[in-house]
Image (cartoon, grey):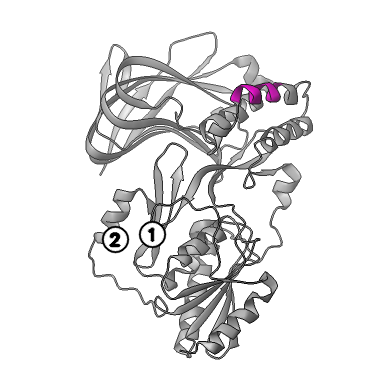
Amino acid sequence: MRQERQSALSAPVSDSKTLQISEEWKFQTNNATCNIISTSEGALAHITAQADSQLFMTIDIDPSIFHKGPTELKFKIKANEVTKTGHFIVKVEGNGSPLYLYEMRNDPVSGTHDWRTVSVSVPRLSKATNAIVGYLMFSSGEVWLGDVQLLQDKTEAESNTSYDKLKEYALSLIKDHYILRDTIDITEFEQFADDAFMGVQNDDQADAALTALFSKLNHRHLIILNRAESFAHGESRQQKSELSLVGNKTALISLPKKFGSEAARQAEFTRTDTLIEKYSENGVQSWIIDLRDQPGGNLVPLFNLTRQFFSDQQLYSTQLVDGSEEFFWLKNGSVEAGNRASMERSLARKDNSTVHDPVSKARVILLISDDTGSAPEMLAQAFSDRENTILIGSETAGLMSSNHTFEFTNGTTIALPIGQSTSIRGELVYKVQPDINTKPDEALNVALKYLEDNRL
């Protein structure tokens, strides 16, 4: 259900430049009621949610605000009998890629408390193309939001990037999002950050300081790209699925290592589906999917490219840094994502849709190696839970975490681990083990020998 009501949010005059907001609150709710009320305390959003409620409420903000300089967002919040938690969200993107994300994870809304003021510092984001502030809740109770203010210091807005702000933003990402944050001494880390940023006067020095700071986290799946690497990363990687016959009624599939625009992805999904169906109609009964040279990528497109090999079912799940879970599942040929309740409702729903899945029960051999990491590794885990599937090669890289990508104002980009992988049985998974252990460069021959010895 979506309701829209008009609200004007304004801030008092102060020494800083006050940015007026006049936008629409947008509500997307399940078992919740929402309304806008005006009181002496300002324009407020009031939410009343029943048990197992899902609520996401947003205000769109002009992204050019963040082009000018560091911005402070302040608001008031009050709660009554919130059974679980809720999060106020600030999200800024640049052409679809996340630049800044604040989710109030260190100080979530829960229980009952009177009005309190929350302040969020957002660094200058010169590439921002869209931005929202909002509220997310998966529980029952009442929440009031009010007096939303965007404040910008005139002198900071007119100056160059504040490198202290870069440091503060980097530390906030680690405190709020890093999945292994409990394993680090944050006081020691803050001292290291002070030392790393001492004397920083330009973007190149800031890039080196950020690289040193995040490298200290010592997580194998933490990816740091400086500006030159960000520009060149992945330009020559394979962009289409490759299918070929390699034996008696056997096809070999090599998946893309890079994906283009959304339109290009959809076209590739359709092309791969058509090829798989064509090979199946021409007598292919066994499939070898090669993930040995797949170091990383985007999880959902990889699931979409292999969706014909699964029935409607759970594919994968992750445990996020705040203790919540995200699930991926297949329904009528489409990969969906959400919480457990959403997945269970989706899979239980009966409809008249039919999807042609000629290979959902077919025999599959998956080739893996210690270079198989990240999203391809998660795909391997999903296949390991599938019936009639054999994994051949060596154990995978151990990079099975969910990442968010963050871009700093000086052009440095990081992919920060924010969730740990779990199997469909809810077990934490770090590496995928093969059923037949062999050297990766011998895995294809071992697979063909296995199929010859175990003909259908």
Q: Secondary structure at mark 2?
A: helix
Q: Which residue is at 48% across, 51% downward?
A: 421
Left or right: where does residue 330 sit relative to residue 80? right
Q: Is residue 265 above or below residue 174?
A: below
Q: Please, what is the three-letter code of the amino acid marked with disc 2?
A: Leu
Q: Secondary structure at mark 1?
A: strand
Is there a contact, CB below 8 Å, between mark 2 and mark 1?
yes
Q: Please, what is the three-letter code of the amino acid marked with disc 1? A: Trp
Question: Can the viewer see residue 331 in this picture?
Answer: no
What residue does disc 1 label?
A: 329
Give whichever of 152, 109 is nearer the camera.
109
Residue numbers of the magenta segment:
186-194
- 91 horizontally vs 216: left or right: left
Q: Position of residue 338 (x, y in %)?
A: 37, 50
Judge whether residue 192 is colored magenta: yes
| Mark-to-mark CA distance, 2 and 1 | 8 Å
Which label is found at residue 407?
none
Q: Is 312 placed above or below 378 here?
A: below
Q: Is residue 411 magenta?
A: no
Image coordinates of residue 173 in percent, x first then y, are 56, 32
Q: Which residue, given by chain and number where applicable, does mark 2 sit on?
A: 347
User: In terms of image quadrants, where is residue 445?
Assistant: bottom right
- Going by the image, does 58 lie left or right of 178? left
Which quarter of the figure has residue 406? top right
Q: Earlier in the sequence, mark 2 or mark 1?
A: 1
Residue 205 visible in the picture: yes
